[in-house]
Amino acid sequence: METSLRAILAKKDVALLEELMDRMESEKNFSLTSIVDELMPFLVMEANLQYGSFHQVKMNLFLRRLAGAGYFSHPTQVKLARLILKEAMNSNWIEVRGGFLQGGAPEQDTLGKMLQSLGEKNAHNAFFYAGQAYRENPRELVQGLLWLSTASIPDTLSHSFSCFLPVMADLVWPGHPAGPTALLSFLMFLSRFPVPHNLPTPVKSGMLDINSLLQTCASGRGIENLHHMITLQLFLQWEKTGFNKGRGLPFRTLEEWVAEKTLDQDRLEALEEMDLPAPANSYEEFAERFDPEEKDSSVAQTLALLESGVPAHDWLFRAYASYYQPDPWNPHFFTGLYSALDLYKSLEIQSLARRMAVAQALEYFGERVNNPG
């Protein structure tokens, strides 16, 4: 797909991009969703040399979900669009596209042959069989690849799963134009790892102590601990997707991954004892109060928002974006915040566990936004 936006990004034409972004601010009907959709065929060609998987794609899909659900005001959508366009401009890209051609004799046992090809590290053959499986039984294709991806969670900081669940749910499953290319990239990623002979017994979240599991996942600092929380949120999201239909999932893989963690008693006790201030009355007041490097204050201000009913998603994502600088920017800032806020909305989870997820995401941001090392 050749569009003016794609051409601007491919040529890294900074002046034209600035002109385009200035026009966005004056368009009353501007939509972040439409920008992400236009970007997506370009984004799935990302050669992510820094992070090694679909981090920008995942970040953009999460923002697209929130924008489509009406969480963002016009000023926030414009600010986020500026950020994702600048990130796209500063990233590396390769010209890779996938597509499914009709014709040829139909194959039997396409899913089995796809898995065999992945085991042989032949992503191209795997993509051929995946294309036919997608036409014949898309639900089993999507489920099978996601289950397979969870086997590599401990070896990939969960990127084999967490970067691709949104891709499968938002691009491949609904038939988005960027879906075939995203599927090819997923298969190329999975072909790096052995295909396991056995997978864990499916378990439904209702059979687990989710509050205890979330407290464990939301304990600790740093990128691995943040991924524990993100991965649990995505498992719970996967459980509710149309292609899973409430079936059990490999929660045991996640439990084994975090089995040796200890509960972060300091974070737990601080949240239990935290007195929340009166919530800010406007975004401007919140932005003045919100200092991500002041850990306790930023957590208290955020929890006050969340518990007051004001537009917390809108203000938080706009505040995060106001700290944007190209060099230290990290897509985990947004993905961690998205996952924590999604968990916070779940009334099935106890308040303290939800607070721990929010605190973990905010602390990760505050520790790194001005100190990328």
Image (cartoon, helix red, strand yellow):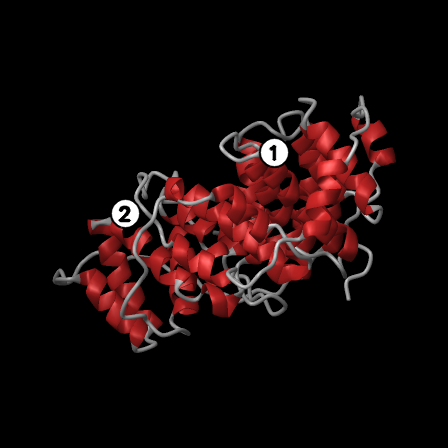
Where's the C terminus, which quadrant? bottom right
Q: Please, is residue 350 above or below residue 118 in the view? A: above
Q: Are marks 2 and 1 in contact (CB under 8 Å)?
A: no
Secondary structure under the numbered disc 1 in the rendered image: helix
Q: Name the residue under label 2.
A: 139
Q: Please, is residue 187 above or below residue 280 in the view? A: below
Earlier residue among tags 2 and 1: 2
Front position in the image: 185 or 356: 356
Front position in the image: 75 or 1: 75
Q: Please, is residue 119 above or below residue 60 in the view? A: below
**Mark 2 nearby-residue class (10 Å; few <14, some 14–19, many ≥20):** some
Q: Name the residue under label 1.
A: 351
Residue 24 appears in view: no
Q: Residue at x 83, y 49 (%)?
A: 293
User: In the image, residue 190 lies at what x, y percent?
Assistant: 40, 67
User: In the image, residue 188 lies at what x, y percent?
Assistant: 41, 68
Q: What residue type is labelled 2?
A: Arg
The quadrant holding residue 148 is bottom left
